[in-house]
Amino acid sequence: MAITPKQRKWILGVGLSLTVAAVASVSGNEEKDEVVVKPEVRKSRTEKKTETVIPLESLKNRSLPQDVRDMFAVKSWHLEQQAEAAKKVAVRPVAPALPFAFIGKMIDSDGKVVVFLSQQGRIYTVSEGDDLAGNYHVDSVRAPLMTLTYLPMKIKQTLQIGEAN
């Protein structure tokens, strides 16, 4: 038996109506994680066919698992790897590069080593224990290195001053 165009329109219309009703009843409530739907089987009195009827009330509280809800969420594996690497790396503070250039050194009459340094055309004469430019403290002067502490961060730095004469 062939279906006429008019019958086809009725069948599609009923199917569309049932689909819209099912979506409307499901989209409003997402409280429960799991819903068990028990279909009813009815036999028609006039025909010998059996129908499966699913009550629409049972579809109202249906919700999807989290991974299905976020199925189209943006995922960038590259950024996650960077975030993981950043968590593993401990960040240590770094003092700025020393702004001084070594010019020379001499031993004064007391036997103390005096070092001559320059910074942007300005010349400093320092020895062990002196403060320098407000931000540095001279810890030690032992050839071939002079040890300075950057006071704001308490970080030690060294400057080459050459071998002893």
Image (spheres, rainbow, N blue to C red):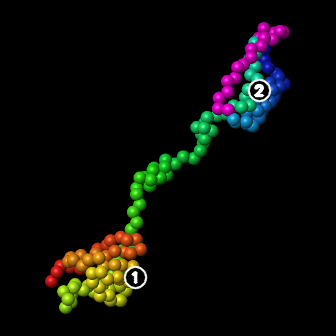
Q: Is residue 103 visible?
A: no
Q: CA distance from mark 2 to mark 1?
A: 80 Å
For the residue pair 108 and 117, the one nearer the viewer reads as: 108
Drawn side of residue 127 relative to residue 136, left or right:
left
> Which of the image's four quarters has the N terminus?
top right
Q: Is residue 54 above or below residue 113?
A: above
| Residue 88 counted in the magenta span | no
Secondary structure state at the residue bearing disc 1: loop
Q: Earlier in the sequence, mark 2 or mark 1?
A: 2
Q: Position of residue 11 (x, y in %)?
A: 80, 24
Mark 1: which amino acid?
A: Gly
At a point 21% along the width and 77% down the height, the residue shown is 142
Q: Which residues are magenta?
A: 32-49
Residue bearing mark 1: 134
Q: Is residue 128 above or below residue 16?
A: below
> Which of the image's four quarters has the C terminus?
bottom left
Q: Position of residue 17 (x, y in %)?
A: 80, 30
At a point 40% along the width and 56% down the height, the residue shown is 89
